[in-house]
């Protein structure tokens, strides 16, 4: 993978993936049945913008790719009353530009607009980003801050997983191997919000990122790239609820985090950045 | 010169769009990997994953058995194919140590990426799959990553050399023995700094690519290569492989950038050539991006110990520089000479008495070899003196611009004989600096700083300048001889007026993004009075342009462009003889303007170049003894280097809390003499500035202590994108070079040379109120933040 959130080594430097077969699924059910058929050797292919780079480096070597990228009925944004529902195959660009998302969850639309560059956003999908469970990605932390629920579908039907229960470890999620992420449900928010993405080049992954919203005593703050999973900064929200000042609450930004060191930042510097960025985010969200 | 007179159809000096661009922008350009070559085998190279190790065993059984694999070779298998080791053309001292180096390592590897096994297969994919099946057993030896550690010789990389030091090259120039030491003793101010020029990866957009194609019968072979130096490559490949030179043809198709990294003779080129001849089939290879990061040369890589001595006015009285230069694992084509290309420039644009004490030691490390990278030696030199000048200004508590003004070589002093004996052709440093400071509103920013850079400010603003002098236009052959360089510095051109008055300009330069086709046509058009669209430029194929010294060192215009002008002169003189013959007048009675020869005083008696070209072709009516056809060849060996100069100013804002640097404004005033095409000049400055700014803020080849490269993709090696750089404000002064008929200097490297010190001086300036006096490159947010924390202590 292009960035190394946990600093693991790349041994191979090839750009040509190992050989694989390819099947295109035309529905969620077909994808799930193909997953059952091919088991461990298979991987779902959505936008391909996380998977293909891994395959080119031969860090992933699936022998079967099941393309779900063209399942049209999994690409939508709907107003569902108290929440909005986003199909897993919705491209980042469509989330970013959606009037519904902009109106009811502006934080998510804004975060989507910070994913990579325009080419990446036209290809990559929200479901792929969440299923990939990369703590350095913007949308896992953003949906976590927003208290989203993910709907997943397997051979035995659908179940719902709260975002806070979804992320298990580095690139590890609560998805079973034969399950498909089909929908993301994001509660509507009101009040202030802020998305702080700190990087060296505009289109890079965040060195540290903060997604935050605040509505009086209620708030949600999540951190990008501050550990092996996206981090919900619960201490910050608790302190705010207890009346702490923004500056004091922000000092607790990294309480839940286990920041790693890499080429761009030591864990010490990451911790410092998280505090600064959480403070800035809360200041912006409180305006 | 004649090009600036008031002719109505003058093309030189206009912003003509580049004729190269439509093909490149629409994807029609043919790069080496776009060539379809039926029956070609694909080369893949198994590379060492250790920085320093002995090869114990290589098991290629499984790879050789993979269907589609045609052959697998170890270094030992191929030893008999090499007539000589890989070439280094610049033995900088008589006792320079140069380890023997073959295209594949035989018994030891010396960097991660060193080639160990070559695979030939029927497809690119199979060739890569085969690499995974090769088992190499190594006895791992300690890596040598740090330059000081390398110098200590605790671990010696090439045992046969007995040391890691390749050479020490001193340049001590004193008016009287001991005057440098004396000057330091008597100085009112001294500065002592240590700067690190981090290793950079050139990252040309097109990685290297090669296709060697044997011709039917007779043993001739054509090699297509993404190279900057087809001519040099031909000579060197012939010598290294023992192929008669006349049997080799090298073609550089469209080449997607080089920045010096394609100024080399690479192992893969020799492998493709040798194996295509051995198997008598075409052999091709294309480099992968991460392979490029490992196996194509790196640039920079120096530790610089900088000492300046100044009198009470701040006038420089002596300088001393000790350079440790990272050669990497082996000496490539000009590796040892690169730091020395800056050796004469460490006094920058300043009046320095003969009190110059420079020395450079080249040292081996177990890392990718270094070689020329945009600016090659001169950015390093300029950085040392320009950041040193800012340090001196801080010490004296005066404005760095004021300090520069006190030291500039003055306009009236040109041509200026420097402390070194070199003659600087022309210049006006004070003017360039004044223009830059005006355009950047230098005084205004200084005022703004008073209110903005207050204690506790979250964002501080800084302004930095760098005035540079570049020694380019490589180069007078005799001077190269005195530096022990293995070739000349001339350039060749042929100008051929075809019967229909269309023109072929054949050049020995080898453009790879610089726009020579456009500029050279403009020069010939201006000279011959033939419309620019009727002129074609042929290049980069040794069968079409057999003579040349290629493109690097900002040499193409001041040497190659001047050669074209010279060839045009010869064509005009020949045409004049024909015109005089046909108009029945003396050659001296003819005037030539706008493509027309006319008899002085009777303008109705005239002949256009087109008629003369046809006359030369039919040869029906030529002066006695004159050869038919209108064609001339001219080779130009420049009498001097060319000396472009300028001042760059950068304004930054530093986020004190996070350490992030944002460039607010960048002003580049460059003087490259007369400009053939100002649009192309600006393009070169833009690209150059961004590359220099990238060294200051973004790029670094990072290695761990075991010698593993950590920045192997464009996600880790931070080449800035358009969204990460400011729009650059360019301006010019024009001081023609008196040494060539076009009055031109080079501009390919200027931007890179000025940018890094201007940016770093700005960053330090922004933070000087916090006690920061130095900053490592790249000034990444973390580095800046840490430096601020340390200054607080
Ligand atoms: C140059 C570049 C820059 C980028 N920059 C950023 C950035 O700044 N911020 C950021 O957040 N991301 C960034 N990305 C990643 C991008 O957002 C990806 O689009 C996203 O991470 C993965 O989405 P995808 O649809 O491409 O998934 P894919 O690559 O197709 O799949 C990723 C993984 O998820 C699985 N998967 C996909 N869809 C589903 C599903 N519905 N159910 C179950 N499993 C599924 C796949 O099997 C695979 O394992 C960047 C990518 C690139 C190439």
Image: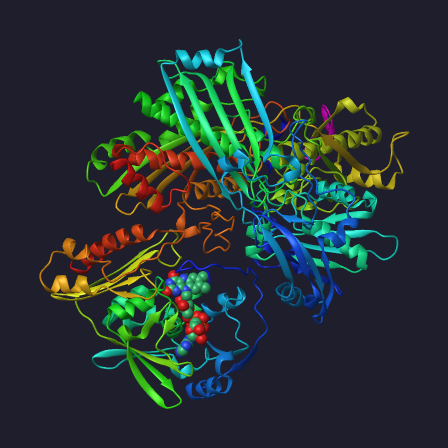
Residue most extreme to the top: B176
Overall secondary structure of the magenta section: strand
- Which quarter is ligand 1 in? bottom left
Q: Is residue B54 left or right of residue B454?
A: right
- A157 on left or right of B150: left
Q: Residue at x 30, y 51 (%)?
A: A268
User: How far across and how far down the image is residue A98, in percent?
Assistant: 32, 72
Residue B69 screen position, x and y as percent: 72, 67
The picture quadrant where one finds residue B640 is top right
- The image shows residue B44, relative to residue B665, as above or below, that is below
Name above or below for residue A175 compared with residue A137: below
Q: Is residue B244 left or right of residue A204?
A: right
Left or right of A84, for residue B579:
right
Give percent across and percent down for residue B165. 59, 33
Boundaries of the magenta span: B593-604
Residue reaching furthest bottom? A156
């Amino acid at each position: 993978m292009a960035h190394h959130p946990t600093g693991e080594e790349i041994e191979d430097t090839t750009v040509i993936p190992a050989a694989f077969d390819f099947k295109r699924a035309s529905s969620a059910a077909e994808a799930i049945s193909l997953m059952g058929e091919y088991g461990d050797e298979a991987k779902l292919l959505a936008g391909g913008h996380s998977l293909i780079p891994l395959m080119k480096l031969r860090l992933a070597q699936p022998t079967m790719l099941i393309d779900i990228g063209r399942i049209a009925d999994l690409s939508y944004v709907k107003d569902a009353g108290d929440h909005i529902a986003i199909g897993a195959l919705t491209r980042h660009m469509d989330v970013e530009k959606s009037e519904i998302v902009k109106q009811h969850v502006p934080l998510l639309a804004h975060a989507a607009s910070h994913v990579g560059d325009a080419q990446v956003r036209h290809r990559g999908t929200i479901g792929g980003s969440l299923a990939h469970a990369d703590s350095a990605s913007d949308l896992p932390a953003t949906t976590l801050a927003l208290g989203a629920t993910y709907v997943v579908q397997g051979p035995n039907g659908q179940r719902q997983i709260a975002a806070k229960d979804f992320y298990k470890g580095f690139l590890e999620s609560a998805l079973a191997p034969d399950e498909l992420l089909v929908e993301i449900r994001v509660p509507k928010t009101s009040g202030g919000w802020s998305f702080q993405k700190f990087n060296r080049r505009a289109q890079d992954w965040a060195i540290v990122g903060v997604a935050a919203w605040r509505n009086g005593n209620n708030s949600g703050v999540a951190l990008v790239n501050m550990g092996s999973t996206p981090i919900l900064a619960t201490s910050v929200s608790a302190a705010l609820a207890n009346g702490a000042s923004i500056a004091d609450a922000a000092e607790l930004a990294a309480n839940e985090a286990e920041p790693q060191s890499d080429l761009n930042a030591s864990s010490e510097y990451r911790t410092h950045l998280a505090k600064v960025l959480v403070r800035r985010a809360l200041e912006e969200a409180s305006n | 010169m004649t090009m600036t007179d008031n002719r109505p159809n003058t093309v030189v000096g206009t912003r003509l769009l580049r004729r190269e661009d439509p093909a490149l922008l629409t994807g029609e350009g043919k790069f080496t990997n776009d060539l379809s070559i039926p029956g070609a085998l694909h080369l893949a190279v198994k590379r060492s994953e250790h920085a320093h190790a002995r090869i114990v065993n290589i098991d290629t059984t499984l790879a050789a058995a993979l269907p589609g694999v045609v052959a697998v070779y170890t270094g030992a298998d191929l030893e008999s194919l090499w007539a000589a080791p890989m070439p280094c053309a610049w033995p900088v001292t008589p006792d320079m140590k140069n380890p023997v180096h073959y295209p594949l390592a035989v018994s030891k590897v010396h960097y991660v990426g060193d080639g160990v096994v070559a695979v030939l297969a029927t497809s690119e994919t199979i060739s890569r799959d085969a690499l995974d099946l090769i088992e190499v057993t190594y006895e791992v030896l300690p890596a040598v990553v740090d330059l000081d550690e390398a110098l200590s010789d605790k671990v010696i990389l090439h045992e046969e050399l007995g040391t890691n030091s390749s050479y020490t090259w001193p340049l001590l120039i004193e008016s009287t023995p001991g005057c440098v030491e004396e000057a330091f003793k008597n100085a009112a101010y001294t500065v002592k700094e240590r700067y690190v020029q981090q290793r950079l990866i050139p990252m040309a957009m097109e990685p290297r690519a090669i296709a060697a194609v044997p011709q039917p019968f007779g043993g001739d072979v054509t090699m297509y290569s993404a190279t900057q130096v087809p001519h040099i490559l031909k000579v060197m490949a012939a010598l290294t492989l023992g192929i008669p030179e006349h049997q080799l043809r090298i073609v550089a198709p469209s080449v997607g950038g080089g920045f010096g990294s394609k100024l080399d003779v690479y192992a893969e080129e020799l492998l493709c050539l040798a194996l295509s001849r051995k198997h008598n089939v075409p052999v091709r290879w294309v480099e992968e991006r991460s392979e490029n990061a490992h196996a194509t040369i790196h640039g920079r890589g120096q530790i610089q110990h900088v000492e300046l001595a100044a009198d009470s006015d701040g006038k420089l009285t002596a300088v001393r520089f000790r350079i440790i230069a990272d050669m990497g694992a082996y000496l490539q084509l000009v590796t040892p000479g690169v730091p020395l290309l800056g050796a004469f420039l460490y006094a920058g644009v300043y009046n320095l008495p003969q009190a110059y004490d420079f020395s450079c030691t080249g040292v081996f490390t177990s890392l990718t070899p270094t070689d020329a990278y945009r600016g090659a030696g001169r950015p390093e030199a300029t950085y040392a003196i320009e950041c040193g000048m800012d340090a001196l200004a801080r010490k004296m508590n005066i404005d760095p611009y004021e300090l520069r003004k006190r030291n500039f070589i003055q306009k009236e002093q040109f041509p200026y004989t420097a402390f070194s004996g070199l003659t600087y052709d022309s210049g006006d440093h004070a003017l360039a600096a004044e223009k830059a400071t005006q355009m950047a509103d230098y005084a205004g920013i200084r005022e703004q700083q008073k209110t903005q850079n207050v204690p506790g400010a979250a964002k501080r603003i800084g302004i930095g300048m760098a005035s540079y002098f570049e020694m380019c236009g490589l180069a007078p052959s005799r001077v190269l001889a005195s530096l022990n360089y293995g070739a000349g510095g001339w350039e060749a051109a042929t100008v051929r007026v075809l019967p229909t008055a269309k023109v072929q300009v054949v050049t020995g330069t080898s453009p790879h993004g610089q726009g020579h086709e456009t500029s050279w046509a403009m020069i010939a058009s201006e000279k011959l009075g033939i419309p620019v669209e009727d002129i074609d430029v042929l290049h980069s194929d040794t069968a079409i342009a057999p003579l040349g010294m290629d493109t690097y060192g900002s040499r193409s215009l001041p040497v190659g462009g001047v050669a074209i002008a010279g060839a045009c002169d010869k064509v005009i003189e020949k045409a004049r003889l024909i015109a005089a013959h046909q108009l029945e007048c003396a050659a001296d009675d003819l005037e030539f303007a706008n493509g027309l020869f006319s008899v002085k005083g009777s303008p109705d008696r005239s002949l256009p170049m087109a008629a003369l070209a046809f006359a030369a072709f039919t040869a029906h009516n030529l002066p006695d003894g004159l050869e038919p056809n209108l064609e001339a060849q001219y080779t130009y060996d420049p009498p001097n280097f060319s000396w472009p100069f300028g001042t760059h100013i950068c304004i930054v804002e530093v986020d004190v809390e996070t350490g992030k640097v944002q460039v607010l404004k960048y002003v580049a005033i460059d003087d490259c003499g007369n400009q053939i095409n100002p649009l192309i000049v600006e393009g070169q400055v833009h690209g150059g500035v961004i590359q220099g700014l990238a060294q200051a803020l973004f790029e670094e080849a990072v290695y761990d202590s075991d010698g593993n490269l950590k920045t192997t993709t464009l996600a880790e090696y931070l080449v800035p994108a358009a969204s990460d750089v400011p729009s650059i404000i360019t301006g010019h002064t024009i001081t023609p070079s008196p040494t060539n008929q076009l009055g031109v200097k080079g501009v390919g490297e200027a931007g890179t040379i000025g940018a890094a010190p201007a940016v770093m001086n700005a960053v330090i300036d922004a933070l000087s109120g916090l006690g920061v006096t130095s900053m490592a490159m790249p000034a990444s947010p973390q580095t800046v933040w840490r430096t601020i924390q340390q200054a607080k202590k």
